[in-house]
Amino acid sequence: MKKNIIFKNFIINSLGILCSRILGLARDVILALFLGAGLYSDVFFVALKMPAFFRRIFAEGAFGQSFLPNFTAARKKGAFTLTVLFHFCAIVFLFCLLVSIFAEFFTKIFAFGFNKETIALASPLVAINFWYLFFIFLVTLLSALLNYEHKFFVSSFSSSFFNLCIVIAAFFVEKNDAYNNLYYFSYAIVLSGVAQLIWHLLALKNNKVIKAMCLSVKFKRYKIKLNRFYSNFFQGILGSSATQLSSLLDTTIASFLITGSISYLYYANRVFQLPLALFAIALTQVSFPKILKHLKNDEEDKALLFMKKAVGSLSILLILATIISIVFAQEITKLLFERGEFDANDTRLTAYVLISYMIGLLPFGLQKILSLWLYAKFKQKIAAIIAFKSLLLATIFAISCVFLIQDDELKVLAVSLSSSISAIYLLFANIKEFGFKKFFTLFSFSKTFFAIICILIFTLFLLEFKVVFLEFLFDIFRFFKGFF
C-alpha cells in the first residue's frame, strides 16, 4: 500500500510539473517569437534571472532544505511556522525594496559585460521583476506545509501560473514593439506570483498548521527560538548560492560574448530543465518527507531501500531523456523556437548548447537524490562545501575556455559544458559522502547489466531510424495541419 502511495504521489507530482513545463515551453515559444535571440531577449532574461536566482537560493534552496527538517522536529508547528513567516516576510520585503531603489547597481552585478545603454534598458525591468521574489517566498513556505502532508499537486502545478500569465500577456503585445513588450511580460511575472499565492492559500484553508498559526496569533504564542533553523538555513545558503552562482556565472560570462549568447543558454536550459524537473525534481520532492521520517524513526534500512528504488528508476529515465535530447537536439530546437525573430542560425547554436547541457543531466539528477541524505541528517554544511568546490571547478573551466578558445561560438558551448562538468563533480562528491560501498548496494548487477544492453539497443535504433521517424512525425503534422 505504501509503495502505491509513493508511486501515486510521484505520478501526481510529475503531472503537475508536466502541465507547468508544457506551458513553460509555450511561454518560451512566445518569448522567442516576440523577443528573438538578441539585445531585448538578453535584457529580459537578465531581469528574469535575478529573482529566479534568489528564489532558488533563499526559497527553494536554503529555506526548503532547512525548513522541512526543523518543522518535522518542532513540537509547536504552528508557532514555529508563524515565527519563520514573520522573520522572513520582513527580510524579503526590505530586500526587494533595496533592489528596486538601486536597480542599476544590481543589474551591473548580474550582467557585468553590459554597456551603460544596455544597463539603463535592463534596470527598470529588474526593479519590476524582483517583486516576484516576495510572493514566491510565501508560496514556498505554504508549499512545504503541503509537502509535509504528501500533497504535491498544488505546488507542482503552481508554476503553471507563472507561464500562463506570460502566455496571456502575449495577447496584449505587438510583434514589432519589443521594447514595450518587455514591460508587459515583466508585469505578468509579478502578477503570476500573486496568483500562485492565492492558489496555495485556497488549498490550505482547512490545514491544521494554518489553524494553529491563527491560534498562535490570537494568544501571542509565537516567540519560538530558531537557532537550529537559522544555523541550517545559513549553511543551506552557502550550498544553494554556490549552485545558483554557477548558473549566474553562465549569464555573466555570456554577457561578454557574442550578442544572443545569453538567449542561447536560456532557451537550451529551458529544454534541459524539462526532464530534470519531470523526473529528478518530482521524485526528490516526493522522497524528501519519506526519507526524513524514516531517519527520524531510526529506520535507516528502510530509507536505503527507498533510495535504491528511487535511484534505479531515476537513472533509467534520465539516461533515456539524455539520449533522445542529444539525437534530436536540432529538431527539438527548431520545432520549439525557430519562428519570428528566432532564425536558423539561432537554432543551430541553441541545439549545440543543449547537447552540452544534456551531458550533465544524469549526474545532476542523481546528485539531487543523494543530497537529500545530507539534508535529512542536518549536514547542510557539508553540502555547502561540496557545492562551492563544484562552483570553483565550473568557474575555472569556463573562464579558461573563454580565454583560450578563439572561436566565439565555441566559447558559448564551453560555458554550457562547464555546467555539466560541475554536475559530474557534484555527483562524485555526494557519492563519496554517502559512502561508495553504500552507493553501489543501491544497484543490482544483473539488472544494471540488462539495462545497459537495452539502452545501447535503443540508442542504435534511434540513430538508425532517425530519418524515418522524423518523416513519420512530419507526415502526421502535415495531415493534421491539412485537416484543420
Image (spheres, grey):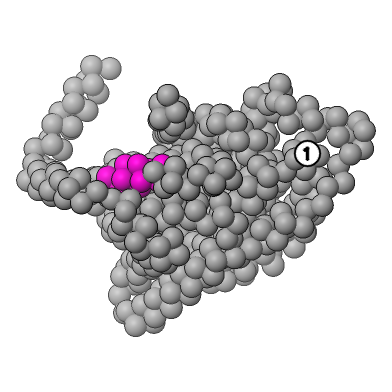
Camera-side residue of 27 and 243: 243
Residue at 76 percent of width and 50 percent of height: 88
Would residue 100 appear left or right of 354 to someone viewing this image?
right
Asked whether 340 or 474 is in front, the reply is: 474
Residue 232, given in percent of the width and then of the height, sits at 66, 58
Residue 434, percent across and down?
A: 43, 60
Q: Amino acid at mark 1?
A: Lys
Structural crowding at the residue carrying mark 1, measured as other residues with C-alpha within 10 Å and reported as few (<14), some (14–19) or many (≥20): some
Magenta stretch bounds? 306-316
- Quarter containing the N terminus: top left
Q: On the rendered structure, is 316 left or right of 476?
A: right
Query: SS class of the residue under badge 1?
Result: loop
Circle 1 residue: 76
Between 481 and 350, the one nearer to me in the picture: 350
Q: Is residue 290 visible?
A: yes
Q: Is residue 312 magenta?
A: yes
- Viewed as shown, does residue 305 lie left or right of 73? left
User: What residue occupies the far bottom of the structure in this picture?
Assistant: 404
Q: Quadrant of the C terminus?
A: top left
